[in-house]
Every structure is written in C-alpha cells, then in structure tokens.
Amino acid sequence: MFNIVIFGAPGSGKGTQSENLIKHYGLFHISTGDVLRSHIARGTELGKTAESYISKGSLIPDELMISILADILDNTPEARDGVIFDGFPRTIPQAQALNTMLAERGAKVDAVVGLQVDDEELITRLLKRGQDSGRSDDNLETINKRLEVYHSQTLPLQEFYQKQGDFLGIKGTGTVEEIFDRIKAAIKEKCGR
Ligand code: ATP
Ligand code: MG
C-alpha cells in the first residue's frame, strides 16, 4: 500500500492536486469533504448531521469522522493498493486513528504533502469558488471560521507529521502544473517513486 495524505488549509488546492496524484501514482482518492457533500445531496441521516457542522464552518466530531473513514477502508477493494487521503486527518486524534487503521493493514502513511498558501490568497480563492460552487460554506463568514478552525485544530498536525518524519512542505502558489512538479519531486526524494 502506498498512502499519501494531502494536507492544507481550505482552498489550498487539495482536491486539484489529488486529481494529479491519482493519475500519476494510480491511487484511490478519499475526499472526506466529497463524501460528506454526497450524503448531504442524498439527504441521508449522516448528511443532515454533517450539514449542521459544515454550514457553520465547524469540523464533524472525530468519532463520527473516524468511523466513516474506517467504513470506506473496509468496504472499498480499490483502496487496497494505496490511497490519497484528502481532508482527513484534520485533527490529532484523527491522525492517531489513521496510523492505527493503516498499521492494522500492515501499512502506514508514506508521505504528507502540505500545501502552503497564505490566508489572503485562500480567502480570494474560496470567495471565487463560492460564486458557482453552491457550497453553504463558501461565504466570507464561514470561510473566516474555517480558517480559524484550520489554524487551531488542523495546523498542529504539521508538527505531528514532522516528528514522524513524513511532512513535505510544498509552496502552494503558482500554476497547477508547477505545484504538481514540486509535489512529485518531494515524493520522489522521500519515497523513491
Ligand atoms: P479544499 O478546498 O482544500 O478541498 P475544504 O475546506 O473546502 O478544502 P473539504 O475537505 O471539502 O474542505 O471539507 C468541507 C467540510 O467538511 C469541512 O469544513 C468540515 O466541516 C467537514 N470535514 C471534512 N473532512 C473532515 C474531517 N476529517 N473532520 C471533520 N470534519 C471534516
Ligand atoms: Mg476539497
């Protein structure tokens, strides 16, 4: 199994670069944001719960999020060879749970790609996306809340993964191609592929 975590603030380009990573490394994409939005669109119980957190810019509780992830890993044969984790983990308990889930499968996180973009640029990108995304969380008030949550709850993961020796900081501005070239070079240096 070859597992990559793509990490960064809201609007940092995780989804875009995940597409490139899937093609290049042949990995399975798990975007927790997409999973939750699909539940919201289908009006499931989980979707109703998720919407109440997402529209406020808050995180879904760890226990629920971890069980969703475990369920996907258990029931997706395509995830056997390797996964791009996009939007998960977002907290230290989620990262610890991911380590455990992968260890149970004889695997580990091979690299964490951390896309680095400053807040001003993030807000510009998210407001632009909000014009046509139809997402209840792409408005200025919720964007500010999401950035606050990112700094307080998610950014501590950078140090967690630095200590683990897995963190690859990548400058997240420039063209999509330039950024992907940086990602490929960093993964090649760390993982040899
Ligand atoms: P990006 O634009 O880089 O894809 P994003 O902030 O738009 O990032 P998504 O990953 O699409 O974020 O997630 C949207 C929302 O779904 C989050 O703001 C949060 O409420 C919820 N969510 C997604 N993943 C998690 C998670 N691992 N833990 C808790 N909540 C989550
Ligand atoms: Mg996304």
Image: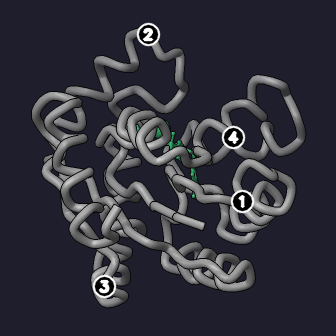
Find residue 132 and name its label.
2
- The amino acid type of the residue labelled 3 equals Gly
Residues marked 1 and 4 touching at CB (< 8 Å): no
Q: Residue at x 20, y 27 (%)?
A: 124
Residue 31: x percent and y percent? Answer: 58, 44
**Residue drawn at (23%, 34%), measured in percent from left and top?**
123
Where does the image place residue 10, in percent across and percent down from the top left?
Answer: 37, 44
The mark nearer the N terminus, 2 or 1, is 1
Q: Nearer the viewer, residue 38 or 55?
A: 38
Q: CA distance from mark 4 to mark 3?
A: 30 Å
Callout 4 touching callout 2 (CB < 8 Å): no
SS at mark 3? loop
The three-letter code of the residue at mark 2 reads Asp
Label 4 residue near ligand 1, CB within 8 Å: yes
Mark-to-mark CA distance, 2 and 3 = 39 Å
First in sequence: mark 4 vs mark 3: 4
- Name the residue at the front extreme: 192
Residue 58 placement (x, y as % from top left): 53, 52
Q: Amino acid at mark 1?
A: Arg
User: What number is the disc on residue 165?
Assistant: 3
Q: Decide: few, some or many residues near mark 4? Use Cα within 10 Å; few <14, some 14-19, many ≥20.
A: many
Amino acid type, mark 4:
Leu
Check disc 1 and report the residue beneath it.
80
Q: Compute the Cα span from label 4 to label 2.
A: 19 Å
Identify the residue position indicated by label 4 in the image. 36
Q: Is residue 115 above or below residue 21?
A: below
